[in-house]
Image (cartoon, helix red, strand yellow):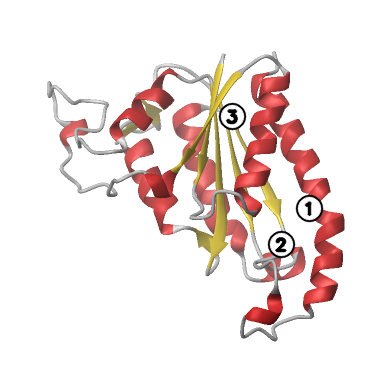
């Protein structure tokens, strides 16, 4: 069994990458093989609306016809048994990098039909982990759930089950004194983070276990 993690953050060892790795650790603890891919290392573009994946009788029907650094990643996901995505929240939504990735991943399997259909031939479990600076209350007031819910719905439509995990009140810097910042008290945030982040890592580990459980 293979589970792939996609890091949609430009940072390889910060909040998103750490929580994502915990999810993969949870899957590995259940015997799965895991792989973490950093999207910002991949040279690719979003969907170009060529529609080759929708062409009747076309050689690329049901698969992305673009050929770039994302092609082998999409091929790996096509063979995977589980998929977990991770992204920090920038201006209320996932990073542009992971949104471009989702265009390429999802649209190849998307069918313009009623009822909705998917060209992905199996059902696999997926998950999306978000890390963000804002507390849960502000996340709710700002309706982050609209964007996150849309991602979850499309992942569910294409692949099957999908689960969302939100990690609030993260820290951006090791040393806040180096940066222009007076949005909140850094010391209070560090203290809050020391409580919340380990709990989020625990939740991510359990999420990873669920991805590969019978």
Mark 2 and mark 1 in contact (Cβ < 8 Å)?
Answer: yes
Q: Which residue is mark 1?
A: 197
Q: In front: mark 3 or mark 1?
A: 1
Give residue 196's position: percent from left, percent from top: 82, 55
Crowd tier of the residue under label 3, counting other residues whose Cα lies within 10 Å: few below 14, some 14–19, many 20 or above: some
Mark 1 Cα shell of 10 Å, populated few (<14), some (14-19), many (≥20): many
Closest to the camera, between mark 2 and mark 3, is 2
Q: Residue at x 71, y 33 (%)?
A: 207
Q: Can residue 17 be seen from the camera position used here?
A: yes
Determine if residue 164 is in view. no
Residue at x 52%, y 70% (from the top left corner)? 91
Q: Position of residue 99 (x, y in %)?
A: 41, 51
Question: Do the CB atoms of the residues marked 2 and 3 lie less than 8 Å apart?
Answer: no
Q: Nearer the viewer, residue 60 or 140?
A: 60
Callout 2: SS: loop
Describe residue 84's horizontal placement relative to residue 23 as left or right: left
The residue identified by callout 2 is 170
Q: Is residue 165 left or right of residue 96?
A: right
Residue at x 65% of width, y 66% of height: 172
Q: CA distance from mark 1 to mark 2?
A: 7 Å
Mark number displayed over residue 161? 3
Residue at the image point whose x is 80% and y is 39% from the top: 202
Q: Is residue 171 left or right of residue 160?
A: right
Nearer to us in this view, 74 or 142 = 74
- Work out how far the residue at label 2 is from the one at label 3, CA to CA, in angstroms: 27 Å
Q: Can you tell which mark lies on residue 148?
A: none
Q: Work out whether residue 75 or residue 51 is closer to the camera in this orientation and state it.
A: 75
Residue 59 point in image, percent of width and height = 13, 22
Above-or-below relation of 122 to 6: above
């Amino acid at each position: 069994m293979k589970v792939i993690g996609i890091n949609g953050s430009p940072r390889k060892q910060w909040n998103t990458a750490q929580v994502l790795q915990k999810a993969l650790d949870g899957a590995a603890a259940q015997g799965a093989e895991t792989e973490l891919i950093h999207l910002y290392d991949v040279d690719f573009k979003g969907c170009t609306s060529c529609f080759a994946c929708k062409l009747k009788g076309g050689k690329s029907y049901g698969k992305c016809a673009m050929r770039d650094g994302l092609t082998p990643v999409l091929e790996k996901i096509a063979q995977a048994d589980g998929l977990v995505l991770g992204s920090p929240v920038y201006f209320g939504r996932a990073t542009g990098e992971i949104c471009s990735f989702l265009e390429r991943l999802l649209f190849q399997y998307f069918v313009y039909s009623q009822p909705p259909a998917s060209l992905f031939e199996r059902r696999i479990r997926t998950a999306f982990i978000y890390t963000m600076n804002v507390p849960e209350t502000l996340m709710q007031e700002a309706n982050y759930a609209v964007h996150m819910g849309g991602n979850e719905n499309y992942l569910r439509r294409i692949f099957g089950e999908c689960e969302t995990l939100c990690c609030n009140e993260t820290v951006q810097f090791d040393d806040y004194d180096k940066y222009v910042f007076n949005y909140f008290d850094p010391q209070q945030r560090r203290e809050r983070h020391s409580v919340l982040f380990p709990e989020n890592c625990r939740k991510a580990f359990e999420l990873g276990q669920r991805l590969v459980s019978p």
